Amino acid sequence: MTKIPSKQTALQPPFNFTDKWEELLDNENFIKVFLSDVLEDYIIKQRWYGGKASQLKYIELAEYFRIQQHGEVYYGLILEVNFTEAFYQHYFLPIAFVSDENFAHDDRILPISIQDQQGFIIDAINLEAFRKVVFERILTAVPKDKTRVRYHKSELFKDCKYESSRFMGMEQSNTSIVYNEKYVLKFFRRIYADRNPDYEMSRFLSDKKDFKNTPAYLGSIQIKDQENINITIGLMQEMVENQGDAWEYMLTEFHKVFSNLEYKKIDISKLPRTEDFGRLQITDVPPEIIDWVGLNVFTKIQTLAERTAEMHIALGSEFEDTAFTPTHFNGDYTVWLKNRLLYQFQNRLNTIENSLHKLDGLALELAHEFLDKKNEIRKRFVNFDWTKLKGERIRVHGDYHLGQVLVKDDDFYILDFEGEPESTIRDRKVKQPPLKDVAGLFRSFHYAIYATIFNNIELYKQEQNHLFEAGEVLYQYLKGVFLGTYIIKIQEANLNIGYNQERIFLLKYAMLEKAVYELGYELNSRPRWAVIPLKGISNIINN
């Protein structure tokens, strides 16, 4: 492993090396130049770099390997980014050497001369030739690849050839390439010393369980590191033609719902209420609510509930692969859960105490309530008695919200199984109650309702507090209709998610956990929106 402190350049440009490109990574001088402030300056500007809130100390080259075909050679680098706060992150960066002066102006990492040929080191993903090599290596993968860089393909990926490739669009933590307008290869940028959950879950659901409402698994790239551990570098899936994600879809639908308050002269105070966490069929929803909200929203919620249930049924129906076999609650899980949540809760408590000056109105009022009731909230997290829980734990999506769901005609497709960004790779693979995913989706409904109000406040005639009141009524009916369909589907398949009281306990517990998690993000990024998780917390602790 080669290490050099940041801002310490070994040589001055222009850098000239006599080595062949195929041997350049063995040259310590090159590594020193490359890992100095040159690479640091490049990485900290990338959207996929997740360490922007911390102070970078130095970068190490943890691993490198060749991505090659027919004499074409590119390098895949595993970079260990060390921070002054005494932690580190790993990133994947493929590199290429180009000599064309007109190429990749924005993605040059290092000007360099190799054997008197001047050019630039660039991120290889910008190079079509590299993208083609990767596509063809997956397409021609052998069933049992024993090499260090292991390409795998499913039986579905056949009878095709490389035609075109392009970037999918603006992403945060990964880079996705669209091939032939039919396939998507996701390069994982932040990586972990283990198989990525997105790879494991996608392959399991698609290959083993034939779950139709997720992009079909087509192939992957793994490397074996120095400790013989598999690291997932890339995941190839089918491209699902879609009309956007469910978040944008629901924002559009909810805007119509709130516009109807004025258009239909609806008295918010007279809207009928419903039981919290009750189970509703559409026929149970009062006519006044149907008239206000419209039938379409509720039928879409039912479809989303069906797809969510089918995902959980597939994930809970495995009895051979121990990574996916259902299990029960126990003491080990309880200790893990409480330790994790109490640590997170204390972190959020510190954040909110330091952020009161950013808040006003209802947000400030709810923040004070949060602080006043901190012992009660902490007690709720501690009050997890596994001996009373009869349901099963399974592998779950782990970061399930409307943004992880694609809309296609009148149906939904679920994607992005990487798990919660703040969690460790091991924590993301812990089996959880399926209702944790449902709770994540419910929190996303809540967000979409409030986001609609915030984004259109000047278009609505009602006072903001009246819109919030209407939003809470809508929220209860959305949850009720979802649960009405979801629980029937789950019970028909004999997946044990516990008795009614247990289900309500788990939903409240997981929704409180999710809202506390969200609170930290909002207070740091957009304090005006902190009212959403604060309201969610208030609803649970006062219900």
Image (cartoon, grey):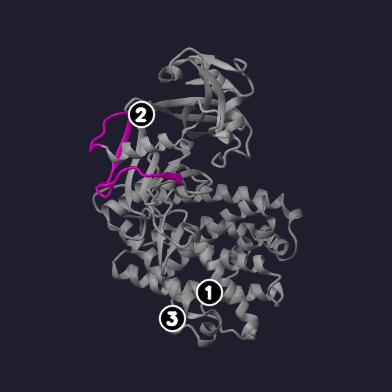
Q: Is residue 12 left or right of residue 196?
A: right
The three-letter amino acid code for the residue at tag 2 is: Gln
Indicate which disc, 1 or 2, sits on the residue closer to the N terminus.
2
Locate the C terminus by quadrant.
bottom right
The total number of labels drawn is: 3
CB under 8 Å between discs 1 and 3? no
Q: Of tags 2 and 3, which is closer to the observer?
A: 2
* Residue pointed to by mark 3: 282
| Secondary element type, mark 1 | helix
Indicate which disc, 1 or 3, sits on the residue closer to the N terminus.
3
Residue 68: image tag: 2
Q: What residue lies at 64% left-to-right and 54% top-to-bottom?
A: 522
Nearest to the observer: residue 302 or residue 160: 160
Main SS, magenta region, reads loop
Q: What residue lies at 65% left-to-right and 65% top-to-bottom?
A: 455
Q: Residue furthest top?
A: 18
* Residue pointed to by mark 1: 476
The magenta-colored residue range is 142-166
Q: What residue lies at 59% left-to-right and 23% top-to-bottom?
A: 36
Q: Is residue 148 magenta?
A: yes
On the image, the x and y values in percent for residue 170 come to: 54, 48
Q: Residues within 10 Å of mark 2 (few under 14, many from 20)?
A: some
| Secondary element type, mark 3 | helix
The three-letter amino acid code for the residue at tag 3 is: Ile
Q: Residues within 10 Å of mark 1 (few under 14, many from 20)?
A: some
On the image, the x and y values in percent for residue 368 come to: 71, 60
CB under 8 Å between discs 2 and 3? no
